[in-house]
């Protein structure tokens, strides 16, 4: 079974460096054969899907609405849920590893779900948001590990590979 990487983060951002980072990350993960799972809309979600498609990867979107039309143009499989923010649980549960880039309150909820569901989390630092605030921290005392921090695309990919290899 192919491994799925859930990528969460800013649904809208004007930070071109953050968007380039996400696009390059999607491309690199797709080249390694990982399936990309996002919330399927704009910002980081669209950029990472764009990158994955450049590399011929598969992209899946778990949408908050009941319409597939809400998905960004780089989504292969759109899953409308009609669940609104509650769809964040599905985005997290579908991933073998969770990667956070920036993010506001929606990303915070996904990080909390990932923590509660014992998912390994990689938080990108350098773009602010909840990923930066929680990098190298524990959300609470339910787990003994910490959220992993990464500054570069190469670091993120290396951590993903390490986590996946240890799970196999």
Image (cartoon, rainbow, N blue to C red):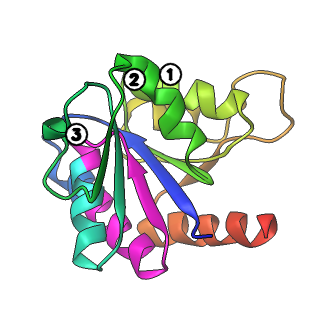
Seen in the picture, residue 10 relative to 165 is either above or below; the reply is above
- Disc 2 secondary structure class: helix
Nearest to the observer: residue 83 or residue 5: 83
Identify which residue is drawn at 60% across, 65% down: 160
- Disc 1 secondary structure class: helix
Nearest to the observer: residue 17 or residue 48: 48
Seen in the picture, residue 48 relative to 39 is either above or below; the reply is below
Labelled pair 2, 1 in contact (Cβ < 8 Å): yes
- Disc 3 secondary structure class: loop
Q: Is residue 60 left or right of residue 130?
A: left
Residue 13 in view, yes or no: no
Is 42 part of what is drawn in magenta?
yes
Q: Is residue 158 left or right of residue 18?
A: right
Q: CA distance from mark 3 to mark 2?
A: 13 Å
Is 74 part of what is drawn in magenta?
no
Q: Is residue 13 left or right of residue 100?
A: left
Segment tinted magenta in the rendering: 21-45
Q: Position of residue 68 (x, y in %)?
A: 20, 39
Q: Is residue 80 left or right of residue 46?
A: right
Q: CA distance from mark 3 to mark 1?
A: 17 Å
- Can you identify the residue that label 3 sits on? 41
- How crowded pointer 2 is (Cα within 10 Å; few <14, some 14-19, many 20+) is rated as some
- Can you identify the residue that label 2 sits on? 106
Give the position of the C terminus as an image quadrant: bottom right
Report the mark closest to the observer, 3 or 1.
Answer: 3
- Can you identify the residue that label 1 sits on? 109
Q: Tell which circle, 3 or 2, labels the residue nearer the N-terminal end.
A: 3
Report the mark closest to the observer, 3 or 2.
Answer: 3
Q: Position of residue 129 (x, y in %)?
A: 39, 31
Labelled pair 3, 1 in contact (Cβ < 8 Å): no
């Amino acid at each position: 079974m192919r491994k799925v990487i859930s990528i969460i983060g800013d649904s809208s951002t004007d930070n071109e460096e953050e968007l380039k980072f996400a696009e390059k990350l999607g491309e690199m993960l797709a080249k390694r054969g990982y399936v990309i799972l996002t919330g399927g809309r704009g910002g980081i979600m669209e950029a990472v899907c764009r990158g994955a498609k450049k590399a011929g990867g598969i992209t899946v979107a778990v949408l908050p609405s009941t319409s597939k039309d809400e998905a960004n143009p780089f989504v292969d499989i759109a899953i409308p849920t009609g669940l609104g923010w509650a769809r964040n649980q599905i985005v997290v549960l579908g991933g073998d590893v969770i990667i956070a880039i920036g993010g506001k309150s929606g990303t915070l909820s996904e990080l909390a779900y990932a923590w509660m569901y014992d998912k390994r989390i990689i938080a990108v630092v350098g773009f602010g948001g909840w990923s930066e605030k929680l990098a190298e921290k524990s959300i609470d005392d339910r787990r003994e590990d910490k959220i992993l921090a990464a500054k570069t695309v190469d670091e993120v990919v290396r951590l993903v590979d390490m986590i996946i290899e240890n799970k196999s």
